[in-house]
Amino acid sequence: MDKKLQIAVLVENHPYNVVGFQKMLDSFWDCECFVQPIDLFVQDEVNKSKYDVVLWYNMNWDAPGDDSVIRRYMENEIGATNQGIVLLHHALLTFQDWDVFTDVCGLHHRGSGGLFKYTQNQTVRETIVDETHPITKGLTEFCIVDETYTIGEPQEPGNQILITTDNETSIRNLAWTRQYKNSRVFCYASGHDDRVYADENFRRILYRGLLWAAGRI
């Protein structure tokens, strides 16, 4: 049996339901999740390279300064190995004007230039458009109540769209995969609060996304 998946969960600069989020992470029975600020993660020379996946749930709005340890990590380390990358909900808004993060997430307009609006308590119908991918295989359309974003669509080359929605307050493409250097990347725009964390469909997609990013499925 494979050892439990080791996951670094990055949080910073955005509130969330800590208890509900942790309960969701704990439900992933073969994963060990270590929640930490991104600033501490990038400085952890002992452990940061040992994680199978890094789950981004932070929202660091501005690009890091020239002398920042976060900038050095993003420019020199991320994607250097096959460590998986998962970007969840508000993490997609991170480093809104920085091309380095655009290359990671495949989403160019992340709130810059006035192209940003969020709408809470939306009924979001999620439609599976790729039924063959390991993350979405066997899943069917479902609805959740979530916060939606009006931002750019993930139109960068290399994106594989998995899930869409017809909610008019949301970006159409909700979930996609891509490759960044040596890393598999899974991006999922859903995931605002405990109503979503507790949803079995959402949990199944996030869990599979972590496994896929780690190369386990």
Image (cartoon, rainbow, N blue to C red):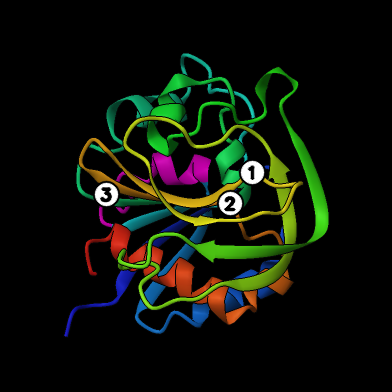
| Res. 178 in view | yes
Q: CA distance from mark 3 to mark 1?
A: 33 Å
| Three-letter code for the amino acid on which mark 2 is drawn | Ala
What crowding class fits label 3: few (fewer than 14 Cα within 10 Å), some (14-19), or many (20 or more)? some
Q: Earlier in the sequence, mark 1 or mark 2?
A: 1
Q: Nearer the viewer, mark 1 or mark 2?
A: 1
| Three-letter code for the amino acid on which mark 1 is drawn | Ile
In the rendered structure, are the residues bearing label 1 and label 2 in contact, judged by CB atoms less than 8 Å apart?
yes
- Pointer 1: what residue? 171
Q: Is residue 167 above or below residue 179?
A: below
What crowding class fits label 1: few (fewer than 14 Cα within 10 Å), some (14-19), or many (20 or more)? some
Q: Horizontally, is 58 left or right of 192 in the view?
A: left
Q: CA distance from mark 1 to mark 2?
A: 9 Å
Q: Horizontal and vertical percent for residue 37? A: 55, 48
| Labels in figure, total | 3
Secondary structure found at label 3: loop
Q: Horizontal and vertical percent for residue 139? A: 45, 76
Image quarter where the N terminus lies is bottom left
| Mark number, residue 49 | 3
